Image (tube, rainbow, N blue to C red):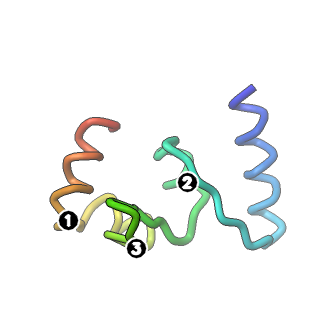
Amino acid sequence: MVSEVLQVIREMVGTGMTMVIVTHELGFAREAADRIVFMAGGTIAVEAPPEAFFANTTDKRLVSFLSKIL
């Protein structure tokens, strides 16, 4: 079922629709998003395009989270 939902979202992205999606599917977020937001403690800790989000972050909470997920 997850793959079907992700496919529908991919199709919607292709139409140019603006969406806000909350997910732990980081591979999908990297593929589909033009901006990714990481929240910690109820506030935005990091907001960046996917390339910078995954490669250039210096936020220790995000680095820790990514090390557990990826």
User: In the rendered image, which quarter contains the C terminus?
Assistant: top left
Q: Which residue is mark 3?
A: 47
Kindly identify which residue carries mark 2: 31
- Toward the viewer: 67 or 15? 67
Amino acid at the residue labelled 2:
Glu
Residue 49 position, x and y percent, is 44, 72
Query: Gap between marks 1 and 2, in whole Å?
Result: 21 Å
Q: Residues within 10 Å of mark 3 (few under 14, many from 20)?
A: some
Where is residue 62 shown, x and y percent of the image? 26, 56
Provide the residue designation for mark 1. 59
Vertical position of residue 15 compared to residue 28: above or below: below
* Residue 61 vs residue 36, the one in the foreground: 61
Residue depicted at 28% across the width and 46% down the height: 65
Q: Residue at x 29, y 46 (%)?
A: 66
How crowded pointer 2 is (Cα within 10 Å; few <14, some 14-19, many 20+) is rated as: few
Q: Earlier in the sequence, mark 1 or mark 2?
A: 2
Earlier along the polypeptide chain: callout 3 or callout 1? 3
Which type of secondary structure does the marked residue at label 3 adopt?
A: strand
Q: Secondary structure at mark 2?
A: helix
